[in-house]
Image (cartoon, rainbow, N blue to C red):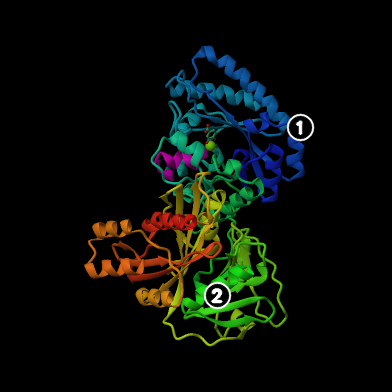
Amino acid sequence: MRTSIATVSISGPLTRKLDAIAAAGFDAVEVFENDLVASTAPPEEIRARAADLGLDIALYQPFRDFEAAPPARLDQSLRRARHKFALMRRLGVDQVLVCSNTAAWSVDDDALAAEQLHRLAGLAAEHGIRVAYEALAWGRNVSDYYHAWRIVRAADHPALGTCLDSFHILSRGADPAAIESIPGDRIFFLQLADAPLLAMDVLQWSRHYRCFPGQGGLDVAGVLAAALRAGYTGPASLEVFNDVYRRTEPERAAVDAMRSLIALQEQTAGLPSAAPRTRGAAAPVDLRVPPPPVPATGFAFAEVAVSPVGGERVAALLTALGFARTGTHASKPVALWERGQARVLLNAAAGESGAAAEVTAIGLETAAPTEAVARAEALLAPVLPRAKEADEAPLDAVAAPDGTQVFFCRTGHADAPSWTGDFAPADAPTAAGPLRIDHLGLTQPPHHYDEAALFYRSVLGLRPSESLELADPFGLVRSRAMESEDGGVRLALSIENVGEHAAGPHLRLQHIALRSDDIAADVRSARENGAAFLPIPDNYYDDADARHDLPPALSRELRDLGLLYDRDENGAFLHCYTLAVGRVFIELVQRIDRYAGFGAANTPVRRAAQQAHDSTP
Ligand SMILES: O=C(O)c1ccc(O)c(O)c1
Ligand SMILES: [Mg+2]
């Protein structure tokens, strides 16, 4: 399927947008009028630039407030159209989007709308131009896609068709199934956008919160599938109005957009009803489908880059938590620390320059690392070159949007060389009880949050849960959990949206959460061995008693050990946090019965405690 994107979806001046869009591999663009008007380049230069880049300018938009005008306004509107059609010829684009009229003066009269659109199409045809009529969800009289199609049908001009936009269709709760009854060759254009499910005014929702398919909660694949079944053979075009993307680096936003279109095509191809009925089309539309997902089943390791001082402090913390330094890498300054199945790599290559300690890589267990990388690459993840010695195990890794390296590992299986073989044995494991990595908490730069969610969802097959907003003493923290099918891999992504008066190392913290079978015993022994935990205020425990009606013995134990508590319908959760070293702290967790969350309700208390601790002299 041909891919396209509206220039409004990308930041920067028009020429830079075009460069970024072409570099990400799009076939076509919709040029937004504002972008052209504000550009210093004349239309001919934009046209030549697009041609040089191999980009087809598929659409010019929007032409507003035209149809169903009182007769006195029509001449003025047609004059405006002539002007635009002449401009479009200079730009070399043969299709214009007319969005439904939002003006208070427009007349609620479909016959009048059809008659005037017929005239507009006739004028367009003289310029070799086609008109695609789109229902805006907030159109004055036409806000439903099928209504727009009925008017197009009544207008009955070969240069007039309809433009479908998944946002306008789905935001109003319309059923996309009726798309299939529109002849495919009358669907002139297809715009795709997702959005988070918000209860708000639809215009505000559209102008500020649209996102790329797969980043929100709308069934965009359902719209694409219906259009394909109708016989639509034009491009799938992303049209995203979003406050964050307006200021995101254009090159990375364009790649994020393309990743979303590939993942969307895969999702659409997998729909039971997907087989496109290509009415009248010469050949069915090919959907671009990456190699199938290879599920990640668990964490192989978390890697922490450390400075010399940070390395000593993390080593002391791990020792207190019952880890042993079980291996030394053959060719790199990396130590393997283990307790049970929990493995942490301390990488001293970071030297003095970076944070004292920082999570820079994660290892994921997968049955087929090479296939996992092939999928990641097909979804435009940057594949990392690895320096390795000839006799070392292959290491397949890609970079996540925040720069975290994601390694695909197969640990301790006879069918594949294990990365652990590259470590020379050091100290013997300790006798401490089993421990495993439960989840990783990764703080994202604000403008990478949706991109990161789509990356982990499409590349790694993790399932996102709803995004939560948690109040912090200095602002809001958004947090979103992503989990593998079996819960073996869990990530908690968060972004900080805090005031400029907020300062302190707690703002960019990451954490490694370790799951214990007996958190009380682990906290006691870790304390005896010198680990320092985050103090939790008494007020928290008074509230926990009130909220959860805790048995007195449990309540006392929580207070004594500084544990936090949460409960869901399936079980309970005990957890606590060590003090941070550099950007990293360790969380100890115990899941009781089938508790499925992350203790997110306690995050504001943790962050206030971390902030209080930062500012304690
Ligand atoms: O927000 C708007 O006005 C607007 C304009 C053109 C479109 O195609 C659209 O979907 C929305
Ligand atoms: Mg649109």
Asked whether mark 1 and ligand 1 are closer than 8 Å, the reply comes as no
Residue occupying the point 34% across, 66% down: 573
Mark 2 crowd level (few <14, some 14–19, many ≥20, 10 Å Cα):
some
Whether 78 is drawn above or below 510: the answer is above
Q: Note whether residue 417 is visible.
A: no
Q: Position of residue 501 (x, y in %)?
A: 51, 44
Dot label at residue 315: 2
Residue to which mark 1 is pinned: 44
> Mark 1: which amino acid?
Glu
Q: Is residue 523 highlighted in magenta? A: no
| Residue 517 relative to residue 186: left or right | left
For mark 2, give the secondary structure.
helix
Dot label at residue 303: none
User: Along the polypeptide, which appears first: circle 2 or circle 1?
Assistant: 1
Where are the magenta residues, as a range? 163-177
Outermost front residue? 617
